[in-house]
Image (cartoon, rainbow, N blue to C red):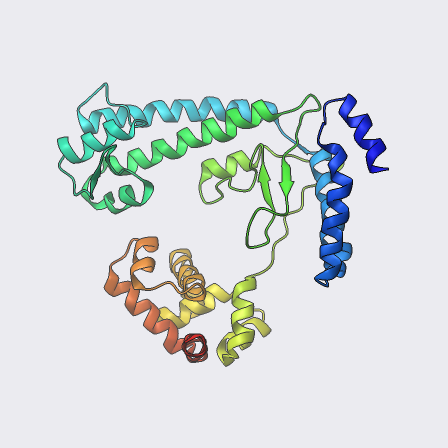
């Protein structure tokens, strides 16, 4: 019974455990009252068991590989720091210090700045990105931040998180993200960068034990398939039904070239437009993410709507209905 369990746990180190059965009974009654028994029984509770198994099992890591990558990363970090010191003319400058960084970029080097607060000039990622055209040292500072984050969070973090069985036992949580996604903590395994060589190197540290393989599976452009379904745009629907490379197809239509002439860069740009449109991105946001002018970004969005007129109609109707 809940009382009996409570007495057992109180004698150990879980003084609140005796309340869990009563809490469960109260919350379970609310679930039934809200008509959510099926959600609880068929989806959420089975998923909780899967996530518990994932946490218990853990994922095998290549400790030697991580350590070797750490050595390489530290070397590159030192080289980047040397270049930063040369560019700024200060051997004592610490790019990790927001105060020193703000003073160096805006007071000493005179780069364009935003508002000054009590803590000094803002040097967040968005601010630094906007300063790229003004000085080559910005690229080095962004690189330094990336390497330092990889080293502290992933290299050292994974080595510290490795258990005696050689595995990392991250905790997976199903109730934290408002979107309904699973989140991961201690360590967070879900925000390891994938678009850089260094980020991919960290991912390679996760290995399968002998006789097994790691499988990567993902929905194929799920948001865009939903957009095709909801908008009914004939070109979007046909692209998916014919199994084409959707981003390459969009690039061909937006940039006016045959599909076989679409370069990786053009495909990447089209991908940014595809997903940006779904989430209501405007010309300014697209120009920032692709590092292009507002005029170019606006032209790309206009061409997109010309290529997929059904999408424009659908999005306009969504706004009209919301009003």
Q: What residue is shown at x 24% (from left), y 65% (from top)?
A: 295
Pick the residue in front: 156 or 30: 30
**Residue 210 shows in this picture:** no
Pick the residue in front: 2 or 61: 2
Q: Quadrant of residue 148?
A: top left
> How many labels were placed on the picture?
0
Relative to 148, residue 42 above or below: below
Q: What residue is shown at x 65% (from left), y 34% (from top)?
A: 207
Relative to 98, residue 316 above or below: below
Q: Quadrant of the C terminus?
A: bottom left
Pick the residue in front: 112 or 199: 112
The reply, left or right, for residue 294 in relation to residue 315 is left
Q: Quadrant of the N terminus?
A: top right
Q: What residue is shown at x 29% (from left), y 60% (from top)?
A: 284
Pick the residue in front: 45 or 245: 45
The reply, left or right, for residue 42 in relation to residue 240 is right
Image x and y of residue 296, in percent: 27, 64
Image x and y of residue 229, in percent: 56, 75
Relative to 46, residue 219 above or below: below
The reply, left or right, for residue 247 in relation to residue 182 is left
Image x and y of residue 44, in percent: 71, 52
Q: What residue is shown at x 54% (from left), y 62% (from top)?
A: 221
Image x and y of residue 175, in percent: 62, 47
**Residue 141 shows in this picture:** yes
């Amino acid at each position: 019974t809940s009382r009996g369990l409570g007495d057992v746990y109180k004698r150990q180190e879980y003084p609140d455990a005796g309340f869990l059965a009563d809490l469960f009974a109260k919350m379970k009654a609310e679930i039934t009252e809200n008509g959510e028994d099926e959600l609880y029984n068929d989806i959420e509770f089975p998923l909780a068991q899967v996530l518990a198994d994932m946490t218990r099992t853990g994922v095998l890591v290549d400790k030697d590989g991580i350590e070797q990558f750490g050595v390489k990363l530290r070397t590159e970090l030192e080289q980047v720091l040397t270049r930063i010191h040369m560019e700024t003319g200060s051997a004592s400058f610490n790019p990790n210090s927001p105060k020193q960084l703000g003073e160096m970029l805006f007071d000493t080097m005179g780069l364009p700045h935003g508002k000054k607060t009590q803590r000094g000039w803002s040097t967040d990622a968005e601010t630094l990105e906007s300063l790229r055209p003004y000085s080559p040292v910005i690229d080095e500072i962004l690189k330094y931040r990336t390497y330092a984050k990889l080293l502290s969070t992933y290299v050292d973090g994974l080595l510290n998180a490795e258990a005696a069985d050689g595995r990392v036992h991250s905790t997976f949580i199903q109730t934290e993200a408002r979107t309904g996604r699973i989140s991961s903590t201690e360590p967070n395994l879900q925000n390891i960068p994938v678009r850089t060589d260094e980020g991919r190197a960290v991912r390679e540290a996760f290995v399968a034990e002998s006789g097994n393989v790691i499988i990567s599976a993902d929905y194929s452009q799920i948001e865009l398939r939903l957009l095709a379904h909801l908008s009914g745009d004939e070109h979007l629907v046909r692209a998916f039904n014919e199994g084409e490379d959707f981003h390459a197809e969009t690039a061909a239509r937006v940039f006016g070239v045959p599909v076989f002439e679409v370069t990786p860069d053009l495909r990447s740009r089209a991908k940014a437009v595809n997903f940006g449109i779904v989430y209501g991105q405007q010309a300014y946001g697209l120009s920032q993410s692709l590092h292009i002018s507002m005029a170019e970004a606006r032209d790309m969005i206009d061409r997109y709507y010309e290529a997929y007129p059904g999408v424009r109609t659908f999005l306009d109707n969504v706004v009209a209905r919301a009003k």
